[in-house]
């Protein structure tokens, strides 16, 4: 990429100059010719065929070829206009312009053949195109029929005069001066030949100005493959290098603590998926390479059990573990269930959060440093400098997308010499295609089955007209001794609208569930953490029958007795968020229900989301649909992943390119892990180019 032409500053390109160059840099980050060249069109205007005048539909953009048979300058009260008539073999078409009249009068030569492009309307019964593009049919015969590129732009760029026409003209001029040596090939010949890919030079020329549909398809195929191949190659090559760079503590045995807990404390059979994942983790522990694994599974699939068994293996090998959760209440929940489950086994657990202070905190820090604590469970407070471990071997991060990469990297420094093994857990199922891209540097383990006996949650969609039946159903459930969540959407924690909605909902519920017979908890983001935790605790203990909340309960307290989730204004929630909320119920043995309340009028997108929720409980199917509906950029956790780096590859549509790129990268590195083969020198060199300026944050779970 080091050619003089591509490195030429954009300021010195004919038609740009300092003012446009500054706006181009501010708006699009364009400094050089290469920067401009590698921003590809997002669509094309089809100028590959002509429409006969008799076949024109109004409001359609058409291209017509005909002879100019008449023209006339009409002087109006305020401005003059020029009107012309074009004739082809099938009829007549009126053309009108209100600007550039004098210039057009000279250009519009009678009895000459022209090509006209524009949107047709019918004005006073006459077929008309206002302000069409027009050019002589013989002015540029080669470009007469073409796919014309359209680029993304901004208001500031348009105001400076850098519009689509100027951009096309500049790019056409630049590409006409370019030769194949200006754009270095970055794929080895054996790959381009095997996959029948055009050269990088041809692909770049054709993506901007394709001579036909076939050339455009070939350019897209080449550029999409190259993008996804190098994205995967960068991740996998770094992963290979790290095998040599980062050694892990070896956990050789599964001993007494693991076996006693497994035989004495688990009252049910683990699922096949849980057993498979534990085997994968054990293999990592024994490999001598630091584990860096993502554990994903649907709500209630038993990820915490896998995490606990992994910590027991660490203990069997003389190492400490830490489990970090994003909220105090979730960390408390983990601490309570794990410490109760381990009673009688002689394993010391401790809890640490911002609210643990004074002598209690000092004691935890002291016993942690001396090695008297085996398992520490807490919030991000465990990352603070005074928290020092004696022999940390395993770090588990729950709901990892809620922790920044920099935060997570601090766990590494707490290992004793070697970095600890890392297991990151998420209850937001990620489609396989997205997991391969976002978490390509992690080994991915998936728990894809729920424990036996767990009933599917019955999900129904209701509108305001069904409110009386919904209230009656809530009464019935409370009579059976069950509890109910009623959740309101949250756009902004300080938004008055959200709080007002929640307050109105609470007031309305009081009319149908009056005190003192019924008790209602209220939880929202503007409450003090202590008040919020107290309300959640009252609900968890069964003191209150209904919890009215915003989405703060999305990751929260586990209440097996809660069997009904009512979600208000469902249309304002994303799919994965709805699925997470629904996962708050269905945790006990009783049949659970999710009631999606919405207004009667819904957008097509909202109807699709609600339909998916009603029809499936499978979080992985829901995640796939979410990817199709929203695209990768909106799915939680992907923004810091580099998915947004793609210029032409589309994660939702180009599954085949993703799997091909991944497969080929894996085969190449399987045979040549450090890219030392001369045939792969071109790949190694281009990876070095891509990695300049990149920190290796990808290693941190």
Image (tube, helix red, strand yellow):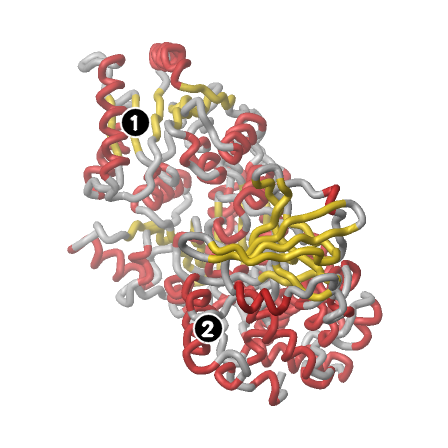
Callout 2 environment at 10 Å: few (<14), some (14 to 19), or many (20+)? Answer: many
Q: Is residue 328 left or right of residue 183?
A: left
Question: Which labelled disc corresponds to residue 293?
Answer: none
Query: Outermost residue, left direction?
Result: 358
**Residue 487 in the image, given as x and y percentages of width and height:** 35, 30
Q: Residue at x 42, y 25 (%)?
A: 598
Q: Is residue 224 left or right of residue 312?
A: right
**Residue 374 in the image, given as x and y percentages of width and height:** 38, 55
The reply to whether residue 47 is visible in this rendering is yes
Q: Is residue 12 above or below residue 327?
A: below
Q: Is residue 96 above or below residue 60?
A: below
The reply to whether residue 226 is visible in this rendering is no
Q: Residue at x 61, y 37 (%)?
A: 125
Q: Residue at x 27, y 52 (%)?
A: 353
Question: Which labelled disc corresponds to residue 24?
Answer: 2
Query: Outermost residue, bottom direction?
Result: 4
**Label 2's element?**
helix
Rendered image quadrant of residue 145: bottom right
Identify the residue under disc 1: 547
Q: Residue at x 46, y 50 (%)?
A: 636
Quarter of the image that includes the N terminus: bottom right
**Residue 319 in the image, given as x and y percentages of width and height:** 44, 60
**Label 1's element?**
strand
Q: Is residue 148 left or right of residue 33?
A: right
């Amino acid at each position: 990429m080091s050619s003089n032409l591509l490195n030429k500053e954009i300021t010195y390109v004919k038609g740009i100059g300092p003012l446009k160059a500054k706006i181009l840099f501010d708006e699009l980050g364009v400094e050089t010719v290469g920067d401009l060249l590698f921003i590809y069109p997002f669509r094309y205007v089809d100028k590959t065929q002509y429409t006969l005048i008799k076949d024109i539909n109004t409001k359609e953009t058409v291209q017509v070829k005909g002879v100019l048979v008449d023209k006339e300058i009409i002087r109006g009260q305020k401005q003059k206009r020029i009107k012309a008539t074009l004739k082809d073999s099938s009829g007549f078409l009126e053309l009108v312009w209100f600007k550039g009249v004098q210039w057009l009068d000279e250009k519009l030569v009678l009895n000459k053949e022209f090509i006209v492009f524009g949107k047709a309307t019918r004005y006073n019964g006459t077929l008309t195109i206002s302000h069409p593009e027009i050019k002589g049919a013989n002015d540029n015969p080669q470009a007469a029929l073409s796919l014309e590129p359209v680029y993304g732009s901004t208001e500031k760029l348009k105001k400076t005069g850098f519009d689509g026409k100027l951009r096309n003209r500049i790019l056409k001029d630049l590409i006409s001066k370019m030769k194949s040596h200006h754009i270095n090939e970055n794929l080895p010949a054996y790959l381009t030949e095997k996959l029948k890919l055009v050269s990088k030079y041809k692909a770049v020329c054709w993506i901007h100005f394709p001579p036909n549909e076939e050339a455009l398809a070939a350019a897209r195929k080449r550029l999409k493959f190259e993008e996804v191949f190098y994205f995967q190659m960068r991740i996998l090559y770094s992963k290979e290098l790290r095998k040599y760079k980062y050694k892990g503590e070896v956990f050789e045995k599964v001993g007494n603590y693991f076996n006693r807990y497994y035989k004495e404390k688990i009252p049910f059979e683990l699922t096949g998926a849980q057993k498979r994942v534990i085997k994968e983790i054990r293999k990592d522990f024994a490999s001598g390479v630091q584990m860096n694994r993502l554990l994903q599974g649907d709500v209630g699939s038993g990820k915490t059990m896998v995490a606990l068994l992994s910590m027991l293996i660490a203990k069997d090998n003389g190492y400490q573990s830490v489990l970090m959760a994003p909220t105090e209440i979730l960390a408390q929940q983990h601490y309570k269930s794990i410490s109760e489950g381990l009673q009688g086994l002689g394993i010391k657990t401790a809890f640490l959060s911002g609210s643990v202070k004074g002598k209690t905190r000092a004691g935890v820090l002291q016993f942690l440093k001396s090695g008297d604590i085996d398992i520490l469970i807490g919030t991000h407070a465990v990352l603070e400098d005074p928290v020092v471990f004696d022999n940390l071997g395993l770090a588990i991060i729950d709901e990892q997308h809620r922790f920044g990469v920099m935060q997570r990297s601090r766990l590494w420094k707490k290992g004793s010499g070697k970095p600890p093994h890392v297991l990151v857990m998420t209850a937001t199922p990620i489609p396989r295609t997205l997991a391969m891209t976002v978490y390509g540097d992690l080994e991915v383990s998936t728990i894809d089955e729920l424990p036996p006996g767990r009933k599917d949650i019955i999900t129904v969609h209701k509108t305001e007209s069904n409110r009386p039946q919904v209230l009656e159903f809530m009464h019935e459930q409370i009579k059976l001794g069950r509890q109910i969540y009623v959740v309101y959407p949250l756009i902004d924690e300080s938004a008055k609208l959200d709080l007002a909605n929640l307050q109105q909902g609470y007031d309305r519920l009081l009319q149908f569930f009056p005190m003192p017979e019924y008790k209602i908890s209220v939880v929202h983001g503007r409450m003090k953490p202590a008040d919020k935790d107290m309300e959640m605790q009252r609900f968890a203990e069964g003191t209150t029958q209904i919890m009215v909340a915003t989405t703060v309960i999305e990751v929260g307290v586990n209440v097996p007795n809660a069997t009904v989730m009512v979600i208000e204004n469902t249309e304002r929630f994303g799919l994965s968020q709805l699925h997470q909320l629904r996962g708050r119920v269905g945790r006990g043995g009783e049949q659970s229900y999710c009631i999606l309340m919405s207004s009667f009028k819904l957008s097509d997108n909202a109807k699709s989301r609600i339909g998916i929720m009603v029809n499936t409980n499978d979080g992985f199917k829901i995640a796939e649909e979410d990817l199709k509906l929203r695209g990768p950029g909106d799915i939680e956790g992907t923004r810091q992943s580099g998915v947004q780096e793609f210029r032409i590859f589309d994660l939702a549509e180009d599954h085949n390119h993703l799997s091909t790129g991944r497969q080929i990268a894996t085969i190449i590195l399987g045979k040549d892990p450090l890219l030392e083969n001369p045939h792969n020198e071109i790949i190694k060199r281009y990876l070095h180019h891509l990695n300049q300026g990149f920190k290796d944050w990808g290693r941190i779970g």
